[in-house]
Structures are given as C-alpha cells and as structure tokens.
Amino acid sequence: MTTIRQRARSEEDKARRRAALLEAAYALAARTGVRDLTLADVTRAAGLDPSGLRRYFTSREELLLDLAQSGGVAWAERLCADVGDGRPRTLEELAHAITTTLAADPVLCDLLTHIALSLEGGVSMERARRYKTEAFKAYDAMCQALADASDEIGIEEAQTVLAATMSLAGNFWQLSHPAPTLAALYEEVPRWGHAALSFEPRLEHLLTAILRGLTAPARTTDTGMRTGGEARGR
C-alpha cells in the first residue's frame, strides 16, 4: 500500500491521497470488519497524519459511505454483466447470480447493515443526496437487468427480490461473522450457534423461495381473496 506523508498540493495529488485512504479503509474492513474500523487505523495504514484526514472526509461515516457507494455500483456492474448475455435465466439462476455477485464483495455485505443504521444519517444532506442518486442508479440498472434476463419476472418482482436481498444479506452477514465473544460462546454451546449460519447458501435458498412465491400462479381462497403472484409487467 502506498504511503502518503507529504501534504497534497495539486488536485491530482488530493484525488490520489483520497483513493489511498479508501483503499486502506477497505483492506482494514475486509480484515477486521466494519464495526471495529476506526479513522486512526485508516490514517495509520495509509501513512497519513490523523489531522489530515479531515481534508478528505469529514467523518468516519462519510468515508464508509464512500465505500458503500462504490461497492454498490460495482455490484450492479457485476450482476448486469452476469445476466446480460441475452440468455434467459431460470429463477434459480437469478437467485444464484444475485447472491454470488453480492458475496464477491465482503465489505459491501458488511456495510449493508450500517448504511441505514448510521451512515446515511451521519453525513450532510448533500452527501446523502449524492449517495442516494448513485445507489438508485445502480438499483434501477439491476432491476432492469433481472427483468430482461427472465421470462418469469418483471420490474416489480425484481424490485421486491432486490429489496429482500439487501435486507436479508445485511442480517445474515452479521450472523455468519459473529464477534469473537459470540464465536467462543457458540463453541461452548453449539446449539446456540445455529444463528451463525452459512451466508451464501442460506441467502440463495431464500431468494429462490421469494422468486418462486412472486411468480406462483394466483389462486382464489374460500373468502374470494387472491393469493400468489399477480400479473407482471415490464
């Protein structure tokens, strides 16, 4: 990792230093987890004086939100490339593609919990607006790619399964990567360790179930209510 001790003068130098800070933050988060990441750790890893960090990020939340933004855009690119070759995908293949392209970035998986919990609300409105703008561009691209890759789902179903993905993945990632105290406790009492489930298989299984439910033929109950999948439009 590049050490950056001298004060940045040009805009190019500032951009390079900012990128080095993000690189250091990502490497640390991948190794120790987001919850334990501190700005002091980041500046130390990047070889920057702690006081200099504020020239690039106003807070820990802003730095992590940058990682979440770039991670979300990259996830969208991976998913769109995976399902965008024109070959129709089955529901099982869609669930697999969503899971594997998300799991390719463990830091993004970890950040999913923190985005809504603290990151979006811990930055300025303008910074939150920029994040939301890029996040929804990525989200819309993924929805369209999923709908285009399937004869069974449309945009509405794609929106539902992606919303479920982000909610379930954020929770499952934390459960499958317990803090050291919990990991030791699960070793002592294995029965309690059922919560520390395997991330990818469980997520893919549930996404497949959700997609099947969304596309199940509608049926009428004894009360006349319709259940199951409704008409789907693109």
Image (cartoon, helix red, strand yellow):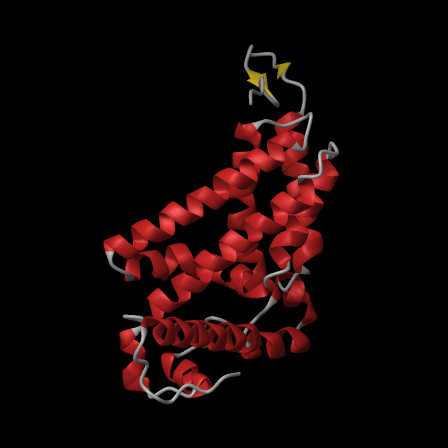
Instruction: Give left or right: position of 168 versus 198.
Output: left
Residue 221 seen in this snapshot: yes
Residue 77, percent across and down? Answer: 58, 49
Can you say whether 97 is above or below 66 in the image?
Answer: above
Could one spot residue 203 in this view of the protein?
Answer: no
Horizontal arrangement in the rendering, residue 3 relative to residue 39 (left or right): right
Q: Identify the image quadrant of the C terminus.
A: top right
Q: Quadrant of residue 193?
A: bottom right
Q: What percent of the width, then of the height, locates residue 190? A: 69, 70
**Residue 26, x across and y down, in percent:** 50, 72
The answer to whether 171 is drawn above or below residue 13 in the figure is above
Q: Residue furthest left?
A: 125
- At horizontal 68% and vertical 30% (from top left) the residue drawn is 150
Between 187 and 12, the one lying in front of the other is: 12
Q: Seen in the image, is 137 located left or right of residue 158?
A: left
Residue at 30% from the left image edge and 80% from the top image edge: 9
Q: Position of residue 156 (x, y in %)?
A: 53, 28
Residue positioned 58% across, 64% down in the render: 106
Please name whichever residue, 13 or 25, is drawn nearer the observer in this view of the structure.
13
Lateral position of residue 195 relative to residue 56, left or right = right
Q: Specify the quadrant of the image occupied by residue 53.
A: bottom left
Q: Residue at x 65, y 58 (%)?
A: 199
Residue 98 vs residue 223, the one in the foreground: 98
Count up the numbered dots. Answer: 0
